[in-house]
Image: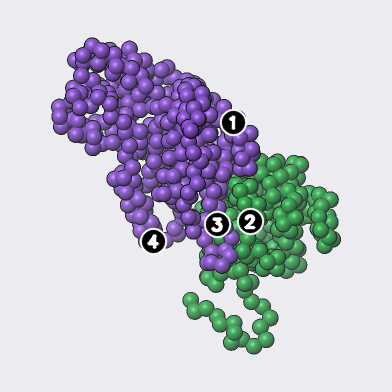
Chain colours: A green, B purple
Amino acid sequence: MKPIDYGELDNMVFGRPDVMEDRPSHFCAGCGHGIVQRLIAEVIDELNLQERAICVASIGCTVTAYHYFKVDGLESAHGRAPAVATAIKRCRPDLIPFTLQGDGDLASIGTAEIVHACARGEKLTVIFVNNATYGMTGGQLAPTTLLGMYSTSTIKGRNHHQSGFPIRVCEMLATLDGPSYIARVSLHNPANVRKAKKAIDLAFRAQLSGLGLALVEVLSPCPVNWKIDPVKALDWMVENMIPQYPLGEFKVTPEIALLKKGERA
Amino acid sequence: MSRKILMGGNIAIAEGAILAGCGAYFGYPITPQNDLLEHMSHRMPEEGRVFLQTESELAAINMVYGAVAVGFRAMTSTSSPGFSLQQEGISYMAGSEMPGVIVNVMRAGPGLGNIGGAQGDYFQSTKGGGHGDYSVINLAPASVQEMMDLTMLSFELADKYRNPVVVLADGFLGQVMEPVVMREPVTKFHEKKWALTGAKDRPKNVINSFEMNPANHPGRIKQLLHKFEKIKANEVRYEALNLDDAEIVLVAYGSAARSAMSAMDMARERKLRVGLLRPVTVFPFPYQPLADLAEKGCKFVVAEMSGGQMIEDVRIAVGSDNEIKLVNSYGGVPLTADDIFEAIDILM
């Protein structure tokens, strides 16, 4: 693919964040992951973290996250990103590790790692993308799949007698004392994308201020595995996902409240 | 002046790691290596280094991976059931060429087994253990001094080859107390241009084992396999005792080798021509020296605290012409010198 030479364009009002790599996205049409990565890139640019950020990728659709940012990065085994990031931060407190994890990764196989990173109050930024399905493996039941929702391993819809109930990660983790900031945002329209960016920005600034773990859960569409067209998928999120996963802030420590006001924590 | 200190085996590993410049230790309690973790819990902070008791052995190995990725020397210690859990992380480390140190103070298995010393993780440790094509260097101490020395060597080899290294000890060695000559702290370290230190004044560094396109993956594996061949060629270590005139060669490592040494002495007192070949590296395995002894017509007694695992490597080295006898213990029970002497007696 021939890269666009932005230098040739007049009156450019929109471009790629500096820290974003110029490479084709591997995500499916209508997927929210690309939006999340762009928001993270914008925040890294704005906070000038390119030389300090470490992208801790996980397994699932975030698997090659390190290919999209011009920052140092590494893979981690399924669910283990918070452990990997913990060690990075403990060894090199000057670095700014952030994990990018899906719901299968964080809310299923990696529950122990995220719970204990939160309990220890590790100074980490966790971006958690919840699309209620196992995207990369082709749409199986996720810990976040809604009751009644189709998946390739619950073809008659999720039935709690068989597969239990969906997990509300933010509400669960907000019971712990370690985290400084826990919020759930959504990508279903531009206004909410902007709110998502604010939350991600705060989650990075929390780490910069030395506060405990900051986690942003991003509700994100997966039209391919939901088997809905991309535009309808956004409506579907509003009608089905948000009632199960209400948006908002679940943990805001006084230090975070100060940061939100633009003051130093 | 070298200081001599009376020390337990697990503590010698801890102090060896500190001398080798281990900057971060992550571990989870499991018997019989708890004193190692406990010792590190105060010694590492004393040295201004990172210590963390983790939520699981899984988290511990993945923290080792994170720590070595930023250029630190890092270690975890565990015992057999925990070592099984760590295979996931070890495979990732091997695949991404990360140099961590894993101490396995082996206990009896399978399953929960018991907390007695054993050597039943030999296959798991020397033949890969996790998924995929890889090997890890395995150093097998047989004394408290070696617990220290081989731990120090493990950090050097890990960095030299950018590969995980296992210190394969056992529960008996972990608890034994012996005088140890303290070594000098390591001052020379490998440059790690690949480490994640922040993408400042250089292109970004990426650490991974993943390759989306199968067409590109064989090249990476070939490079790994080439590295393991180099390790096999350069890093075989073993101790040879009384082998020049030996008719019977004892082959044993770790605690079993200590009993084998006593059995050899008992045999020599009776004018029996018995020697000992003690692998110090069980991967890479000393195939060639054993093959040379087989050529001379020696008989072999393999002494190990397992159902019979290392004996398969001895068989590969020796071939089918020479007699090989297994003398073993399992289930957390030590192998005694008398057991081994009896096996020698039968062969003679």
Q: Indicate which disc, 1 or 4, sits on the residue closer to the N terminus.
A: 1
Q: Residue at x 44, y 19 (%)?
A: B332
Mark number, residue B196: 3
Q: Amino acid at mark 4?
A: Asn
Front: mark 4 or 2? 2
Residue A225 at least partly seen: no
Give the CA separation, mark 1 to mark 3. 29 Å
Task: Tell me whether the residue at label 1 lies in contact with that at label 3, contact meaning CB atoms closer than 8 angstroms.
Answer: no
Task: Tell me whether the residue at label 1 lies in contact with that at label 2, contact meaning CB atoms closer than 8 angstroms.
Answer: no
Q: Amino acid at mark 1?
A: His
Q: Amino acid at mark 2?
A: Leu
In the rendered view, tell whether residue A1 sits above or below residue B122. below
Task: Tell me whether the residue at label 3 lies in contact with that at label 2, contact meaning CB atoms closer than 8 angstroms.
Answer: yes
Give the CA separation, mark 1 to mark 4. 45 Å
Question: Image check: B237 left or right of B60?
Answer: left
In the rendered view, tell whether residue A128 sits above or below residue B250. below
The residue pinned by badge 1 equals B39
Question: Image check: B37 left or right of B2?
Answer: right
Mark number, residue B216: 4
Give the CA separation, mark 1 to mark 2. 28 Å
Numbered disc 4: secondary structure? helix
